Amino acid sequence: MTATQPLLQIRGLRTHFSTESGVAKAVDGLDLDVRPGEVLGLVGESGSGKSVTALSILRLIPDPPGHIAAGEIWFQGRDLLTLSWRDIRRIRGKEISMIFQEPMTSLNPVFTIGRQVMEMILTHEPATSRDQARSRSIQILTEVGIPDPATRMDQYPHELSGGMRQRVMIAIALVLNPSLLIADEPTTALDVTIQAQILDLMLELKARRAGGAILLITHNLAVVAETCDRVAVMYGGKIQEVAPVRDLYRNPLHPYTRGLLASLPRVDGERATRLTTIPGSVPDIHNMPTGCKFSTRCAERFEPCDSIEPPLVEVAPDHLVRCHLHEAPPGTPAHQPASAHDV
Amino acid sequence: MSSPDTILDVQDLNVRFPVFGGIIPRKTSEVHAVDGVSLTLGRGETIGLVGESGCGKTTVGRAIVNILRPMNYRVDVTGRVLYHRNGQVVDLASQGQASMRRYRADLQMVFQDPYSSLNPRMTVGAMIEEPLTIHTSQSKAERRDRVRWLLDKVGLSPSHASRFPHEFSGGQRQRVGIARALATNPKIVIADEPVSALDVSVQAQVVNLMQDIQQEFGLSYIFISHDLSVVRHVSDRIFVMYLGNIVEAGPADEIYRRPAHPYSQMLLAAVPRPGPDARRTRRVRLREEPEPSGVAHPVVDDLPSPLNKPSGCAFRTRCPIARPDCADSAPPLVERDGRQVACPYTT
């Protein structure tokens, strides 16, 4: 292994849900690396499995009905999926923290902002005095741009606007300097001007703290283009394409990625007379195609696509795609070993 | 600015919602949700109404179709909504609910959420048929034929008529909503965030469908959305709203190319752009926010509460070029560079 040892390695993750109509394979064989210090975008439409992936990393999948059927998630030399509940709780918030889409519902309405920020410190670092915890909380609220943080400490979530609440969530997530921040649609519920500020804030805070990585989950390809170093495109519970952000937008290889990018209306440049579309809609999770998951909507489908699922192969440096149209250059080994730790 | 091709002419529309408080509820204040909005809509034209949540864009749409009073009888609506119909001009705002019924068939709405705007206990066919039963004298067989024809028009199959909403995906449900809006042969369709709840790959299908239908039926659209990219794609002219006021109005291409009002500039600058070289540079800078220094910089990032609208120009609390006299009086919309702008100081 080289110097770019990933911070987080997901191998063969399968997260399934038992439902009345059968087993829903929300995530079904997912391989993904998050490298130290990078912002990795995980994009996909609703139902593609991106949020389930995030919840699986922190073992937050409600069980039942869900369970992690297979896979490994390596973080700092340990497989998160084999840790005891006590150990995983030590990692949540301290090593890996998460912010969610709805700043309305992720804060507890009956506790003050201050208590919720301090709780994070006091839970993970019980030796801290309350005074120290308070001053650290005020400091992090200042850092995330909350005006008059000492007063805000004693206020309740309903007294803050949506943008301010999301800043508080970021403060809670970052107060212990985690090495990985998972942000699941952090700006989707916000107006576009507030979205811009929250994204700026996340990048600024990241720049100030060396080494921290962000896994940004979103359906918005424009947000990804502006904030991420690499992008992973998900469809049907699997990664379909991974590439550095420039490569992905300049040279998208998977027909699904190409379709998504072509279907975006533009706010600048020439105005298209007609939008390009991807025909059909996302297949029913209980009736996923056996071959390539995108085969039911793909204009470039050919003989093997319906029956054989293509592997994820590295077709150019750091550019991986799961499509029969793109084969690995001869002589390259299949991309990933079953377990990343069988070095 | 009424021309022969104008179908709708909204003049000085004001909407005030009372706010109640106290143990024995009494009116304590009011929200001036729409504050003197005027706009025109041409035949076959699409106008876009954009702005952040709470700016009053949805309320404008609802006031035009005169459904605010049935929703909240204490609401105070003033102004005129002149509908040009067969050479006659009718003020929709002055119609009572009974006489309004005559015009309802001509003005239809498409809503944002295809999940909650369809009745889960009615078949899709029955829902599309309902407006025909109310507004036309067609026989049952004629109505059934029309439902099948409408389903085909919106890209669904006639066999879908007997199914229930839960059997459809989000995109298909929005097609049902469009079919229902089209049932009575409307002249004007007010679409309030029609594609915001849809996935990217489906959003483009529905936008294209709406444009095809507009061409085929000669419809006029009022397209209300916070998504500036979609609005640009569909609109001929756009109206930018901020806290109940129109701050800039004009041809979409002009405004997107060179926004004049500081709020339009801020809004457009904030829209993320997809592309290989889109790497984020800090573009949205607000008042009271110094240059990034690496440490704390408090921001005033919020739309002020409509209950506490700033005096004078409502945008002045977030405006990067605000001056002291902006607090004195609200700047009027003034014609300049082929558009209307409500700011005397922008360059």
Image (tube, rainbow, N blue to C red):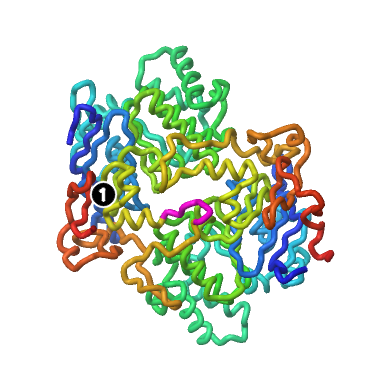
Q: Secondary structure at mark 1?
A: strand
B327 to A293, vertically: above or below: below
A239 to A203, vertically: above or below: above
Q: Position of residue B246 (x, y in %)?
A: 25, 49
At horizontal 67% and vertical 39% (from top left) the residue drawn is A294
Q: Position of residue A11 (x, y in %)?
A: 75, 58
Q: Which residues are magenta?
A: B271-277
In the depicted view, which residue is nearer to us: A337 or B24? Answer: A337
Identify the amino acid type marked 1: Glu
**Residue on which disc 1 sits:** B248
Q: Would residue A192 appear left or right of A289 to someone viewing this image?
A: left
At horizontal 51% and vertical 68% (from top left) the residue drawn is A170
B272 inside magenta stretch: yes
Instruction: Classify residue A282 by image quadrant.
Output: top right
A316 inside magenta stretch: no
Chain letter belonging to callout 1:
B
- Residue B340 seen in the current view: yes
For this orientation, the residue located farthest to the right is A342
